[in-house]
Amino acid sequence: MEKIQYIEKPDWISWDAIHECLVQSHQVNAQEGLHMTNQDLTGEALKKKLAGGYCFVALEGNKVVGVFGLKILVGKKWWSWKKKVAYNCLDGILPDYQGTDVYFGLNDLRMKYIKNSDVDMIQSNTAENNWRVRKICKVKKFKTVQYSATGKGADYYSVIMVKWLHGCPYSDRFINLMFKISKFVVKTIWKPGYKYRFWFN
């Protein structure tokens, strides 16, 4: 294995190469029945989704072996109202490089950008059954704040996890309550992919 380089995506790396990395990265998820929506997006669609944000790549020579995305948003949810949120997105590492230092290299680079952006919190959305990512987030002191039916085309429910960078203003009991309420509401009304569970006239 050559030395891995961690940089912000340069112009010479195409968005189609980013797409191909994400597709291959989520092969294990697909085998376990999780169809991640980002793998269906074209390179151009990924570019639009990340507009105004950052795309970080792990390179072995000229080969893209990992991708992490970042957008800085103003929050509109109960946990993030009018706060500056670093939204982690478009994460993917090729199967042969999973379980190596590639994750930590990309995460360190993204964290440098987050710290320079003076954000209040970091948000990460992942599939409910994606235990690998959820375990990593839990170790890094993220708290699970909301349940979601995910976007159109998805076949799974997801969870939203948040890490406050300047101290969490809510008790664990309150956060757990809000999560349970959101899960009850979402599962009552929605199927995965924001499909109504019932037909409303």
Image (cartoon, rainbow, N blue to C red):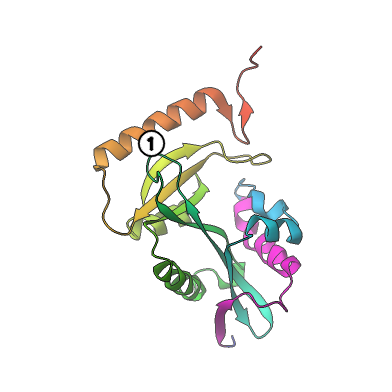
Lateral position of residue 138 relative to residue 12, left or right: left
Lateral position of residue 145 relative to residue 154, left or right: left
* Residue 120, picture quadrant: bottom left
Q: Which residue corresponds to the image point at 54% horizontal and 23% vertical from the top-left? A: 189
Name the residue beneath numbered marker 1: 179
The question of residue 114 being in magenta is answered with no
Q: Nearer the viewer, residue 155 or 38?
A: 38
Judge whether residue 130 can be spotted in this image: no
Residue 10: x and y in percent read: 66, 78
Label 1 residue SS:
helix
Residue 8: x and y in percent read: 58, 75
* Above or below, 50 relative to 83: below
Lateral position of residue 150 relative to residue 84, left or right: right
Q: Which residues are magenta?
A: 3-31
Q: Which residue corresponds to the image point at 61% horizontal and 18% vertical from the top-left? A: 198
Q: Amino acid at mark 1?
A: Phe
Q: Which residue corresponds to the image point at 35% horizontal and 60% vertical from the top-left? A: 140
* Above or below, 58 relative to 191: below
Residue 152: x and y in percent read: 66, 39
Query: Quadrant where the C terminus lies?
Result: top right
Q: Nearer the viewer, residue 106 or 70?
A: 70
